[in-house]
């Protein structure tokens, strides 16, 4: 049984009251699907408290923001956990309700042994455009910056990051190391002294395998998020359909997210409950102006400086890479290379399994 199936089963079994008396009869089980950092970071804890206090049942399916949003659109999930706001360019998302839940922060992470501790917005922008490629340019060692990213171009943390720095959540970036979700990206960073990637504060704060970089001299904390001094804070949302079959149960859970119990869970995971965010968004124009003053908008020269398709050779996650290339450039030469890379990887895996089954050592 898979871990996901085990979790779903465990959360669906009625609990028996203390002393073996009256059994707990759950309400309709609703399905939450969304970004894995939210699920691992705080959603599982929220669900446990909700079940205990409200006797409500949720099945958590953690994967990615875009998978959750699409599952709600298709009626395969009742709620999506999203690390980004609505993408107005997608007509299918315009039928959805995006309810703000908490404030989190986008954090740039690297290996703990990397001597670099701070990064500027301008440097981040240049790195993701492929114009800064060596840690030495950031005051670190003379070593390449191994840039990691998420394959799905509409996923939460990176979509929000690109919208802040480039005014376009779909902005193409020069990151050949592509992963299916942020959890896999974090695993890669933890074993690569030259790695760099993006995740969230709620996911990174307790992960000793990564080091969070300050941005423009400001460290991501609940205080710097709440007062707006950390520039890359974001809103986390729960997403639902207005015509959801389980709308009553979904609304019950959304109301619970504004409770004191839910707020305590969020604060434990370094989030700022939206009800406590105060006037931070009334000052958002000031924050965006600070970001704009630190960088300049993408220019034709930036686009010309981007690596060409044939230069962006994927080096990780061959299936994720192929999916991303099919979605964004199905006829490109790089898409065919990604398809060939996946075929080679699958053949190598098959050869290794055959060798193991026959008792031979794989070549």
Image: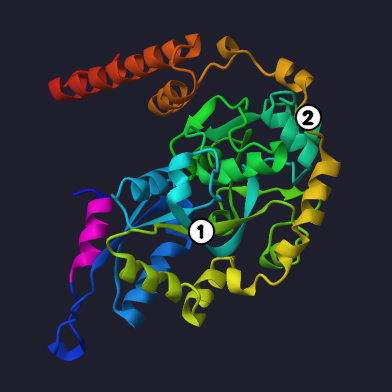
Q: Position of residue 304 (x, y in %)?
A: 73, 15
Rendered residue at 74%/64% (across/down): 282
Q: Is 156 located above or below residue 268 in the figure?
A: above
Q: Is 312 located above or below residue 228 in the figure?
A: above
**8 within the magenta span:** yes
Question: Nearer the viewer's eye, disc 2 or disc 1?
Answer: 1
Q: Nearer the viewer, residue 270 or 30?
A: 30
The answer to whether residue 337 is visible is yes
Look at the magenta stretch and give its main secondary structure: helix
The answer to whether residue 224 is visible is no
Rendered residue at 14%/88% (across/down): 22
**Horizontal relation, residue 34 to residue 298: left or right:** left
The magenta span reads 4-13
Q: Position of residue 250 (x, y in %)?
A: 35, 67
Find disc 2 in the rendering and name its residue. Answer: 136
Q: Which is nearer the N-term, disc 2 or disc 1?
A: 2
Q: Is 100 located above or below residue 158 in the figure?
A: below
Q: Nearer the viewer, residue 115 or 34?
A: 34
**Horizontal relation, residue 93 to residue 159: left or right:** left
Find disc 1 in the rendering and name its residue. Answer: 237
The answer for how far apart the CA atoms under marks 2 and 1 are is 38 Å
- Could you tell me which secondary element the residue under label 1 belongs to? strand
**21 within the magenta span:** no
Q: Position of residue 244 (x, y in %)?
A: 32, 59
Could you say which disc has been placed on residue 222 in the image?
Answer: none
């Amino acid at each position: 049984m898979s871990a996901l199936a085990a979790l779903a089963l465990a959360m669906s079994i009625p609990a028996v009251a203390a002393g073996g008396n009256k059994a707990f009869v759950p309400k309709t089980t609703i399905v939450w699907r969304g970004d894995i950092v939210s699920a691992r970071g705080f959603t599982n804890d929220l669900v446990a408290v909700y079940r205990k206090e409200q006797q409500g049942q949720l099945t958590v399916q953690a994967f990615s923001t875009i998978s959750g949003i699409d599952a709600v659109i298709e009626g395969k999930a009742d709620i999506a956990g999203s690390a980004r706001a609505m993408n107005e360019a997608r007509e299918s998302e315009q039928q959805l309700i995006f309810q703000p839940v908490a404030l989190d922060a986008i954090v740039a992470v690297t290996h703990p042994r990397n001597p670099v501790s701070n990064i500027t917005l301008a440097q981040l922008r240049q790195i993701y455009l492929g114009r800064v490629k060596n840690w030495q340019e950031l005051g670190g060692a003379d070593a390449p910056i191994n840039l990691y990213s998420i394959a799905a171009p509409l996923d939460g943390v990176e979509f929000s990051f690109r919208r802040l720095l480039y005014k376009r959540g779909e902005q193409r970036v020069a990151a050949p190391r592509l992963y299916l979700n942020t959890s896999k990206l974090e695993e890669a960073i933890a074993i690569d002294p030259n790695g760099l990637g993006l995740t969230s504060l709620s996911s990174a704060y307790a992960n000793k395998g990564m080091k969070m970089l300050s941005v423009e001299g400001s460290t991501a904390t609940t205080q710097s998020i709440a007062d707006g001094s950390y520039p890359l804070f974001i809103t986390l949302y729960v997403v639902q359909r207005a015509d959801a079959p389980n709308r009553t149960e979904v609304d019950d859970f959304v109301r619970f997210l504004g409770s004191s119990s839910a707020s305590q869970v969020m604060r434990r995971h370094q989030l700022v409950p939206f009800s406590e965010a105060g006037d931070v968004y009334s000052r958002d124009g000031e924050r965006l102006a600070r970001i704009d003053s630190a960088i300049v908008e993408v220019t034709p020269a930036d686009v010309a400086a981007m690596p060409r398709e044939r230069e962006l050779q994927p080096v990780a996650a061959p299936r994720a890479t192929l999916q991303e290339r099919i979605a964004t450039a199905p006829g490109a030469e790089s898409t065919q290379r990604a398809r060939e890379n996946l075929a080679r990887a699958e053949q190598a895996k098959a050869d290794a399994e055959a060798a193991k089954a026959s008792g031979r050592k794989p070549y």
